[in-house]
Image (cartoon, rainbow, N blue to C red):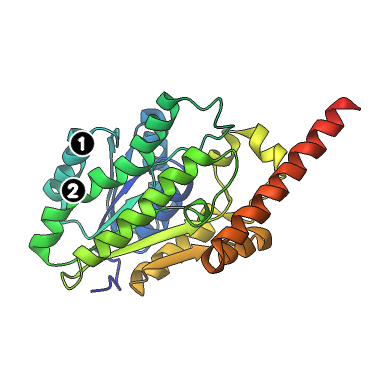
Amino acid sequence: MALTNFAGAVAVITGGASGIGLATATALHAKGAHVVLADIQGQKLQGAEEQIRQHTAAGATGDVVSMLTDVTNEQHVQALMHKAVEQFGRIDLVLTCAGVGHGGPIDTFTGEQMQAMMNINFMGTYHSVRAALPTMRQQQEGHFVFLSSAAGKQGAAFLTAYCATKWAVRGFSTALRIELHGTGIGVTTVYPSWVETPMIHQDPEIVDLFNIHALQTADDVAREILQAVMEDKRDLTLIPNPEIALLVQLTRDDPDKAERLAGEHFQRQIAQIAARHTQ
């Protein structure tokens, strides 16, 4: 059952202190939703709550509360969902926006770094579903929105760990939709390419190396997410970058060719960079 009216709806958003999470929380609150913000960054979380209140103060009918949450900790996430139910009586929408996106050569990307990224990007999503699902089943309705990535539909050199986590979100959401078929609980998986958020500035070397351009803002993605929820979309792919869109399409149609061409392009980039450094 699609959530077509956000007025009075209860939305829980992880990673809500910045980026797509904050933008979507702001958009939901402006439409009358009660918003429960969660993030591990306490100071930013308080600022985000205040920002939402100020941004939507005129005529806003929903409330906004926040809770310091480590999405890698199952008990933290259980407590978050309990707070939402205790405060507002239900959970209509859960958006899992908490994520990190560090990159680098696989040779130097440690197992500890890989595990940390998987715990945040994937297990945070998993814990959120497990914690919210009993309430949604009792209501016989609800909706999940998972943030995957264009990297969940293709491979990218120097982003092996990130791709692995986002493919995991994709596989999980596909299986979950099958399991929840007919329950009234929907799942939308979002696949954005580069978005102008704090995440893309975590690895400036990668951005410079591949001449990355963010062609969409967090507000752009937030608007698309709300529309996708209203339409009960399963797949929301947002890739305005022509070269990434082409590779995603090719990966779907001819994965062997896509990997070969991407690999050749990557090696040419590395050779060009090496040549510049020797001049």
Question: Tag 1: residue type?
Answer: Glu
Pointer 2 residue: 130
**What's the CA distance linking mark 2 and mark 1?**
9 Å
- Identify which residue is drawn at 40% across, 58% down: 58
Q: Position of residue 1 (x, y in %)?
A: 23, 74
Q: Which mark is residue 138?
A: none
- Identify which residue is drawn at 31% across, 58% down: 173
Question: Tag 2: residue type?
Answer: Arg
Q: Position of residue 256 (x, y in %)?
A: 57, 59
Is 211 left or right of 103, judged from the image as shown?
A: right
Which image quarter holds the C terminus? top right
Is 110 left or right of 125, judged from the image as shown?
A: right
Whether label 2 touches label 1, CB < 8 Å: yes
Could you tell me if residue 89 is visible in this image?
no
Q: Position of residue 63 (x, y in %)?
A: 27, 51
Q: Which mark is residue 74?
A: 1
Closer to us: 222 or 89? 222
- Identify which residue is drawn at 41% across, 44% down: 165
Is 224 left or right of 61, judged from the image as shown?
A: right
Closer to us: 198 or 106? 106
**How many dots with numbers?**
2
Closer to us: 197 or 55? 197
- Identify which residue is drawn at 54% across, 39% down: 198
Q: Position of residue 32 (x, y in %)?
A: 31, 62
Q: Quadrant of residue 259?
A: bottom right
Q: Secondary structure at mark 1?
A: helix
Residue at the extreme right:
279
